[in-house]
Amino acid sequence: PPASGPRLVAAVRRCLGAEGAEAKRRAKLTRLTTLLLCQAGMALLDMACRGSHLALSGGERAIRYALARAPLSARGEATEEAWEVRADYAAEGFEEFLEASSLEGPRSCSTGSSLRR
């Protein structure tokens, strides 16, 4: 739905404490976080992952996002707040795939195939 974008931004701002007087101070954090939570962000993350980069045909996709404060132990010596953005991607039931580095066309596969990142 068209309203999902504004709702997502509002939810991210609430989670980051980037509302009211804090909105301007946390603008870069909000911008980076919303980038990671969009389709372009998923593409960037996919390129950073090891393994083949595939275009899939058919089946279903699910993306789950989580935003949480980083535990103190993960922050090292940093005194600033730290955040973890997690994105889990799952594709199932696809019928064909095309590897990005391949010069050949799409290849068939079992609809029982799945991909998780």
Image (tube, helix red, strand yellow):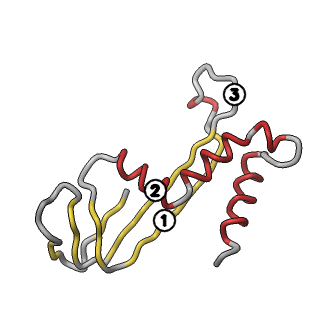
Callout 2–callout 1 Cβ contact below 8 Å = yes
Instruction: State which quarter of the image contains the N terminus.
Output: bottom right
Question: Dot 2: few (<14), some (14–19), or many (≥20) neighbours within 10 Å?
Answer: some
The residue at 54%/51% (across/down) is: 36
> Which numbered disc flags the more N-terminal residue, 3 or 1?
1
Q: Position of residue 25 (x, y in %)?
A: 78, 36
Look at mark 2 in the image and give the residue it sits on.
Answer: 42
Look at mark 1 in the image and give the residue it sits on.
Answer: 63
Q: Which amino acid does label 3 sit on?
A: Glu
Left or right: 84 as drawn, with respect to 13: left
**Image quarter of residue 105:** bottom left
Look at mark 3 in the image and give the residue it sits on.
Answer: 80
Q: What residue type is labelled 1?
A: Ile
> Which numbered disc flags the more N-terminal residue, 2 or 1?
2
Q: Relative to 61, does residue 35 appear above or below in the rendering?
A: above
Residue furthest toward the front? 103
